[in-house]
Image (cartoon, rainbow, N blue to C red):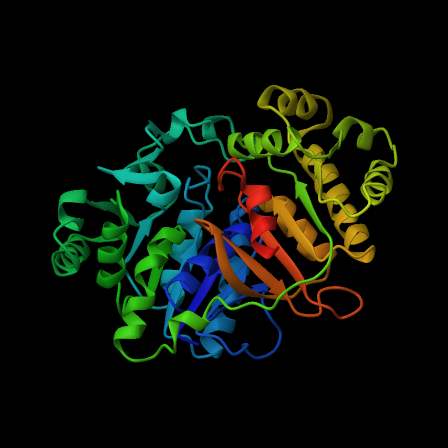
Amino acid sequence: MLLGCIADDFTGATDLAGMLVRGGMRTVQTIGVPQGTAPDADAVVVSLKSRTTPAAQAIEESLAALRWLQAQGARQFFFKYCSTFDSTDAGNIGPVADALLSALGSDFSIACPAFPENGRSIFRGHLFVGDGLLNESGMENHPLTPMKDANLVRVLQRQTKRRVGLARYDTVARGADVLRERFAALRAEGVGLAIVDAVDNRDLMHIGAACAGMPLVTGGSGVALGLPANFAAQGLLGDPGQAARMPAIAGPAAVLSGSCSRATNAQVADWAATRPVFRIDPLALAAGQPVARQALDWARAQAGVPVLISATSAPEDVARVQAQLGVTAAGELVENALAEVARGLVASGVRKLVVAGGETSGAVVKALAIEQLRVGPQIDPGVPWMVADGGAADGSPLALALKSGNFGSTDFFAKALAMLD
């Protein structure tokens, strides 16, 4: 293993793994910290569910992942979080980064959630989503991690005792050597974590090159675009064209959507315009109605046509449900229902499954008892197809696309399934 990665949610791990495959690294994603030895891969991404857990728990789980990756001989480590820097003033990005740095005996790392291909850019330390600031993107209304400040230097400084600095766009644009000099100067000033500007893929490549040999890199998946080249330059990678290979998967397809992001709402609406949808009502779940069973009965009645089973709702509807049920309870009801639906769909023969939403993806993977996924070709930036060998009860492979809520084009669901056709 060359690169050992720790991701704070399932779709974030998938996003990162896809970026590494794109760079020519054979990559495997594990669900939680493995118990045995590492699979045969250039990079392993350990996916946790630590984005919104208490900071102490997130630190404990992340350190456990680090210890396993160290035991497998990883040469460099990557802590991956969301490209919208999802967190609160209590963490978890800063506390986990601090703990990982201390465990590695290092005093400096970068923090760069930029992913320009998906509209996430950083300029003078401020995170933009598309043409607007983070706090005007809809993320200010996130039910668990509302992002009300686009200045990442301020946001991260509230989470860490280390001094936070900035490597500006004009330094990044001058290339890796100049950027390395900036990192050295920041370290000399006592900076422990540096926000790094990035507005395009060229910037990401410069950042990746400047991070060669850095014990720990932290950021969104975009930063990983520049890391494989460091290993390739040392002659440590095989044929990059083989990294994304996956077997042909036969069988029916389905889509499950639990995210309520703007992007996913648009994707659900696009699908619903021409294809069948079953809507899951959290209030019906709370009332004890057998919604999951009804969804499965409905899906089976569609005679093999790809279906969408969705709990995606507009922000005002989400707020209304949360006011009645509570934020945590509403989320758990939906996750558990979609997990039950996923089990039923796979048991009935579905072999291609698209899942929208990080929490939903985590619940589905857990319900299907999947421990490891091989990463295949990219569908849209940040979202690849993946294969769980023996993921179905009959031992056949199962194809999964685990999409972060805000990722993907409007026609993502149909596009994903068409790739496997």
Find residue 270 and report its horizontal and vertical position in percent: 59, 31
Residue found 51% across the figure and 48% down from its top = 55
Rendered position, 205 above or below 278: below
Is residue 22 or residue 157 the one in the foreground?
22
Q: Residue furthest front?
A: 421
Asked whether residue 175 appears in the rendered view, the answer is: yes
Is residue 114 or residue 98 the one in the foreground?
114
Find residue 26 and report its horizontal and vertical position in percent: 46, 71
Give the left or right position of residue 395, taking residue 100 as reference. right
Rendered position, 174 above or below 64: above
Quadrant where the N terminus sits is bottom left
Asked whether residue 357 appears in the rendered view, the answer is: no
Residue found 48% across the figure and 66% down from its top = 244
Residue found 28% across the figure and 61% down from its top = 107
Give the left or right position of residue 192, taking residue 59 as reference. left
Find residue 214 and report its horizontal and vertical position in percent: 28, 66
